[in-house]
Amino acid sequence: MGSQPDQAPLIAIVGETASGKTALAIELAQQYNGEIIAADSRTVYRGLDIGTAKPTLAERQRIPHHLLDVIDPNETFSALQFKDLATKAISDIRSRGKVPFIVGGTGLYVDALLYDFQFNTPPDYQLRSHLAQLDVNELQEKVMELDIAMPQNSRNPRHLIRAIETGGAQAMRRELPPNTLILGLTIDRELLRDKVSKRIDKMVDAGLVDELVKAVTQYGWDAPGLQAPGYKALKGYIEGSSTLDEAKALFVQNDMQLAKRQRTWFKRNKDIHWICKKEESVDLITTLLNKSSIA
């Protein structure tokens, strides 16, 4: 007999950029009759495929993916929107007798969904549009002027803007639902740097520069979808103030800084089971599925 919907299994795979989450998730989803929900604040954007390391068409043909290509690069997207869409996707996947896999490195998205964050203050898009014109230092000054708590990632404009919108109020979180397993993928620092560097070379060879030029021409550099560290690293090269090698080096630096922020976020979560290879996840998932009575 299958589980009740609120007792059905849910598996999340989290970790740093370029750590191998997508490849692992596809293997596990194939093995355990699953479908993937992308928890990534960049792959939601249409047309930004290469620079966001979006799963390839071949990978999506192997396993159905949800929450890719949701909005255009000039639109904003919040954790609340992700939570709502992901909740619907989970219901859809379960209705077909399959196992949902939440996969990504955007910690706020993952936590908002798994811990059922209650967002007390809806986004104020007019205020957000105004604040988006300010740089990081100006946003930090405004946070201090309002005498509210500085967000943990005080250099992230989105986090600063959200802190201002909510007056510093934190989203209420609930307990992790039953039969939910969170796997965290670990990777050695030097191996990660090597993977990031090789991935960037592949991105450039695959047409990253053309993809970015097309998006900038259509939406401009200030578009929300173009605020990813990798795209920013290429701005100097596209505008003629740096070489391609310099842009690649900056891309690596930005991605390694992103990885550090992601690692810091996830390391706080005591519910995560940390693994470094697929084999370590098999026993954990098998136990979960047996417990859920659907193995």
Image (cartoon, rainbow, N blue to C red):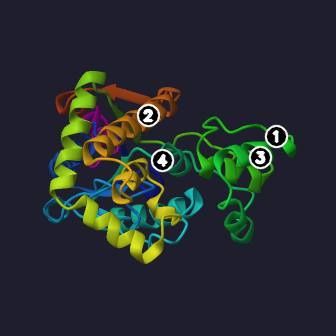
Q: Is residue 69 left or right of residue 108?
A: left
Q: Give the number of the disc on residue 126.
A: none
Observer-nearest residue: 236 or 130? 236
Residue type, numbered disc 4: Val
Residue 110 numbered mark, or none: 4
Q: Secondary structure at mark 3?
A: loop
Q: Pointer 2 and pointer 4: residues touching (CB < 8 Å)?
A: no
Query: Residue 249 appears at what percent x and percent y?
Result: 31, 38
Q: Position of residue 94 (x, y in %)?
A: 35, 62
Cα–Cα span, label 3 and label 2:
27 Å
Point out the frontmost of discs 3 and 1.
1
Residue under label 2, please give it: 257
Q: Earlier in the sequence, mark 1 or mark 4?
A: 4
Front in this rendered view, residue 15 or 279: 15
Q: Which residues are magenta?
A: 284-295
Q: Are marks 1 and 4 in contact (CB under 8 Å)?
A: no
Q: Most extreme residue toward the bottom, as rendered?
A: 218
Residue 144 got which mark?
1
What's the residue at 38%, 33% (across, down)? 256
Please say whether residue 160 is one of the residues in the magenta stretch: no
Mark 4: give few (<14), some (14-19) or many (20+) Cα within 10 Å: many
Q: Which circle marks residue 169 in the picture?
A: 3
**Mark 3 or 2: the one toward you:** 2
* Quadrant of the frame with the N terminus: bottom left
Choose the circle earlier in sequence order: 3 or 2.
Answer: 3
Residue drawn at the location 69% of the way across and 45% of the way down = 172
Amino acid at the residue labelled 1: Met
Q: Amino acid at mark 2?
A: Gln
